[in-house]
């Protein structure tokens, strides 16, 4: 089927630069997606946006260009709970990729096992109203209990303002939990302010909780953007990500978020997003944990 992209859709950068920062051997891009291609893997009828196609082949080409070793591919909402494109990419990548799926309560044990065999190691619960319809918490908790025996974890995507309401639910999740994009802080507020410190408190009080220091391009309000060789982009996000990396060095993950769905004003150069890493993980030891050791343990059991 042919699809028309959401009006104003920005396609991913067509010629990302080769980063100056040389990624350590074994680096994992722990947050990226594949979209379609729609003709092979149709988009969900429940989707809130229609993206450009972004195939496994294009993802693997980016991986190699950036010097990334492995990927964690996260099911995006435009594919609903049909994980076929994700599974297809995982099967092609073999040991070089793991996945995070979206499932509903009617999934069978056999289907869960098939996802596991393909490389899935987690499910994602998304709380952004612009991306998904509401799913009752009891359904999500039921899913969390079903996936726990597989050794999987739960990835949560929410906005900072919603954390107070979601706290008790997150507290009840019986598995490891990974927070997407630092819980989407409002970076015009202070790092030591109430809002961001609630996320910090959640991480401090829950040793099962991890955090992705991803998406400066989504969170930044003042830029400058990672374009045209800019080596100090998204300066307003740096204090937030650096704080999380330094306070929770053993529970942080990094990723590109390629192909950057739903960006509105610019599309970053992915090479420059790699060059952002030393601004937030300022020592070789922190970089090794963020990029290699932490994701290897969570997704590859090593
Ligand atoms: O790519 C991301 O992580 C962020 C997204 C898209 C998304 O999560 C999804 O469609 O599942 C966003 O904020 O629009």
Image (cartoon, rainbow, N blue to C red):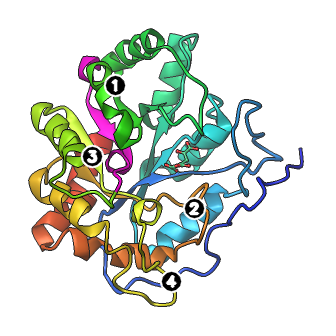
Nearest to N terminus: mark 2 or mark 4: 2
Contact between labelled residues 4 and 3, with CB atoms less than 8 Å apart: no
Q: Is mark 3 on a helix, strand or loop?
A: strand
Give the numbered dot on residue 59.
Answer: 2
CA distance for labels 3 and 4: 26 Å
**Residue range (magenta):** 171-186
Mark 1 lies on a secondary structure that is helix
Going from N to C along the chain, the mark reached first, 1 or 3, is: 1
Which residue was labeled with disc 4?
A: 227
Cβ at disc 4 under 8 Å from ligand 1: no
Tell me the crowding category of disc 2: few under 14, some 14 to 19, or many 20 or more residues within 10 angstroms, Cα based: many
Inter-mark Cα distance, 1 to 3 = 19 Å
Query: Could you say where residue 2 lies in the image, as x and y percent from the top left?
Result: 89, 49
Q: Where is residue 85 in the image (x, y as percent from the top left)?
A: 65, 42
Q: According to the image, label 1 marks what residue?
A: 165
Whole-Å distance between the Cαs marked 1 and 4?
37 Å
């Amino acid at each position: 089927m042919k699809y028309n992209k959401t009006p104003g859709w920005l396609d991913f950068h067509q010629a990302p630069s080769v980063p100056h920062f040389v990624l350590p051997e074994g680096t994992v891009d722990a947050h990226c997606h594949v979209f379609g291609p729609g003709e092979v893997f149709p988009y969900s009828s429940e989707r809130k946006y229609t993206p450009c196609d972004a195939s496994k082949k294009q993802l693997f080409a980016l991986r190699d260009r950036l010097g990334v070793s492995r990927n964690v591919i996260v099911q995006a909402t435009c594919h609903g709970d049909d994980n076929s494109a994700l599974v297809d990419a995982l099967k092609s990548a073999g040991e070089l990729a793991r996945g995070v799926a979206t499932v509903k309560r009617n999934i069978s044990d056999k289907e869960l096992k098939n996802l596991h065999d393909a490389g899935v190691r987690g499910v994602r619960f998304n709380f952004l109203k612009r991306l998904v319809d509401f799913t009752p918490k009891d359904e999500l908790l039921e899913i969390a209990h079903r996936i726990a025996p597989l050794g999987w974890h739960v990835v949560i995507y929410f906005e900072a303002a919603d954390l107070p309401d979601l706290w008790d639910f997150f507290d009840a999740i019986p598995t490891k939990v990974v927070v997407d994009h630092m819980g989407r802080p409002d970076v015009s507020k202070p790092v030591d302010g109430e809002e961001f410190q609630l996320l910090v408190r959640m991480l401090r009080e829950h040793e099962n909780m991890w955090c992705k220091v991803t998406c400066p391009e989504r969170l930044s309000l003042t830029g400058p953007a990672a374009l045209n060789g800019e080596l100090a982009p998204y300066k307003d996000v740096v204090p937030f990500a650096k704080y999380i990396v330094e306070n929770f060095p053993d529970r942080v993950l990094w990723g590109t978020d390629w192909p950057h769905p739903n960006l509105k004003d610019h599309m970053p150069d992915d090479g420059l997003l790699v060059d952002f890493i030393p601004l937030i993980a300022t020592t070789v030891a922190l970089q090794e944990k963020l990029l290699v050791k932490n994701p290897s343990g969570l997704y590859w059991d090593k």
